[in-house]
Image (cartoon, grey):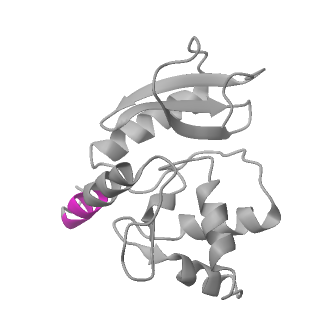
Amino acid sequence: MNTSDISNEFIDYLDSPMGILQLQANATGLCAVGFVEQRQTTNKPNPITDRTKQQLVEYFAGDRQVFDLPVSIEGTAFQQQVWQQLMLIPYGQTCSYQDIATRLDNPKAVRAVGSANGKNPLTIVVPCHRVIGANGSLTGYAWGVSRKEYLLKHEKSSADSPLD
């Protein structure tokens, strides 16, 4: 994600337990959520970035399992299909790239699923971290396997504690 040429977008940041999250939105939806080493620009929030921050705070507190946000992300038709499948993986659970390819009626598309998963512009919100290798290994994650492991452990511990 190239954040140096942001124009006419809204941007804000959230200090998460795993580092700084940069949130980008336009007037209609959330466009990107990703980790950055430092804040790269002045905050220019809008109601969508405000709502995203609030829901991410709730997620990290263990009080939110599903995000309810308008999104505005671009990708190929196949990428959009994969990202939709990611949204169907229940909180605290995982599935494999093969599982997703099979759900898309394209069982040979495992590598394409992996590629689309890696291009997910909305980390955490579209839970690409819930996809693991067929052998149960924590395969790559665009933001680092240690963050993926953190997210999975966080969800598992929160899922084991019912919400009030």
Q: Point out residue 71 in the picture as x, y percentages from the top left corner.
A: 67, 46
Please give the range of residues in magenta: 155-160
Q: Quadrant of the C terminus?
A: bottom left
Farthest residue to the top: give it: 42
**Residue at (52, 48) in percent of width and height:** 123
**Residue at (43, 28) in percent of width and height:** 14
Q: Point out residue 107 in the picture as x, y percentages from the top left corner.
A: 66, 88
Q: Nearer the viewer, residue 31 or 37?
A: 37
Residue 83 shown in magenta: no
When asked about the image quadrant of residue 29, the answer is top right
Q: Nearer the viewer, residue 121 or 49?
A: 121
Observer able to see residue 145: yes
Residue 158 shown in magenta: yes
Observer able to see residue 83: no
Q: Point out residue 143 in the picture as x, y percentages from the top left corner.
A: 47, 46
Q: Nearer the viewer, residue 153 or 137?
A: 137
Q: Quadrant of the N terminus?
A: top right
Our reading of the magenta stretch's main secondary structure is helix
When asked about the image quadrant of residue 11, the answer is top right
Along the horizontal axis of the image, is 65 left or right of 154?
Answer: right
Along the horizontal axis of the image, is 161 left or right of 24?
Answer: left
**Residue at (59, 14) in percent of width and height:** 41
Along the horizontal axis of the image, is 1 left or right of 42?
Answer: right
Q: Point out residue 112 in the picture as x, y percentages from the top left corner.
A: 69, 71
When asked about the image quadrant of residue 76, the answer is bottom right
Farthest residue to the right: give it: 77
Q: Count the marks.
A: 0
Along the horizontal axis of the image, is 39 left or right of 100?
Answer: left
